[in-house]
Amino acid sequence: MANKIMIAENSYWVGKVDDRKVPFHRLILEKGTTYNSYLLYTEKPTVIDTVDIMYGAEFVKNLQEIIELDKIQYIVINHVEPDHAGGLPALVNKAKNATIVTTEKGKELLIGMFKLQDKKFLVIKDGDTLDIGGKTLKFFETPYLHTEETMITYCIEDKILYPCDLFSTHVATYELFDDLASEDITEDFAGYYKLIMHPHRPYVRDMIEKIKDIEINMIAPSHGYVLRSNAKKYIALYDEMSQKVSTDKKALILFSSMTGNTAKIAQYISQGLNDMGVETNVINTKNADLESILSLAEKSDAIIVGSSTKYADMIGNIEDTLKEILKLDLRGKIGAAFGSFGWSGEAVEILNDYIRNSSMTLLDTSFLVKTTGDESIKLPLRIRFSPDENTKNICIRAGRVIGEVLIKQ
Ligand SMILES: Cc1cc2nc3c(=O)[nH]c(=O)nc-3n(C[C@H](O)[C@H](O)[C@H](O)COP(=O)(O)O)c2cc1C
């Protein structure tokens, strides 16, 4: 018998309940989870997200009992992780007329992961709408929630938000709707937020800003309960939980700069750290007092050093300052290097070597990937000449990711 639950007129949950203890992100989900997929059975039938890769064949078989797969016109992929996009290859191979709807980055990742280069894609941008014949979908890009390519989908007529991982819970519920749950789900809801979304707190704020003016009657996420009792309450909870929190973490950012480019990078990194509630001191070593730098270094959890490159070396007295700092007991602190350069950027690498050889833990790309799962930021941070809009955002993001590491310590 087909597995479908109506959530609105012509709209159905067609997902999978996984009531095992599910291994996930180096954890075990004790209460299991669900992979919520939705079928909007309009004139241009549309599937929103799929299920975990291990249930792909079962998912397609189930859908086949509900709809002739050739009729499916669109498959919306909000997020490419295989617990949501894992059913896509099996589905799109049978749903011959379907176009995959996703972000630019989503398309790139899906092609890479599932070899879908021969399939039809519709790449959406923030705010785009799509008429699916009787219903209209509106898309919002929500990068880094919790990976770079993510977006969320809103059905204008039904006032339903399909936010994929956002607003989820890891509970293997067969009841589906929050008002049918046998116990209060707030703890599971908040626990999921803390685990998956809170490390990306500034981006949660961006998402809330994007959806603040739309009327949402129901939230249909991709794990756990469909929230129909009081969608506003759950949005308010995300709003509350993602408010700026001050941490007890501190970072010292030292730099030297000829024409101000590295100074700008230092400020942007500081901005990103502040977004994560980390207090920063940003100091140009040129005229600074060594004693106060050493005192700040002792009190800081992270020491981030930057210099531009001049004739294959660093500039100013940053090297002398760093040598003095390295005489301190720096165990338990993290260190990272950055700098502007023109064509070779030796200064950044030499600074990085100093940190690697110190008692601090070097924050480099490998460490970042292992701690945060983020590979979009490369450390040491190398910026060619003056930061433009794109590299400015990379610098801010580097600060946020370093902040994430500090919070997780
Ligand atoms: C005298 C001089 C020497 C430079 N030598 C190098 C070099 O050896 N390698 C390099 O990658 N860039 C070199 N550059 C480029 C600078 O690193 C680049 O302009 C950088 O953006 C300056 O950043 P700042 O304003 O923070 O000093 C040199 C620039 C100048 C003015």
Image: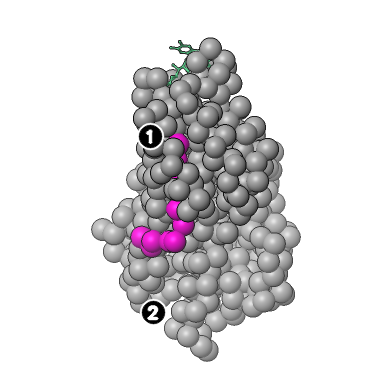
Q: Residue at x 43, y 57 (%)?
A: 201
Residue 340 falls within the magenta-colored stretch: no
Foreground: 360 or 58? 360
Tell me if residue 211 comes above or below residue 181 in the rendering.
Answer: above
Tell me which label, 1 or 2, sits earlier in the chain: 2
Residue 73 in the image: state x and y as whole percent: 52, 48
The region drawn magenta spans: 244-254
Residue 138 in the image: state x and y as whole percent: 37, 51
Q: Is mark 1 within 8 Å of ligand 1?
A: no
Q: Residues within 10 Å of mark 2 (few under 14, many from 20)?
A: some
Question: Most extreme residue toward the front, as rendered?
Answer: 291
Which numbered dot is residue 288? 1
Q: Tell whether 190 sits left or right of 58.
A: left
Question: Most extreme residue toward the left, as rendered?
Answer: 213
Q: Tell whether 361 sits left or right of 233.
A: right
Q: Residue at x 49, y 29 (%)?
A: 318
Q: Quarter of the image holding residue 87?
A: bottom right
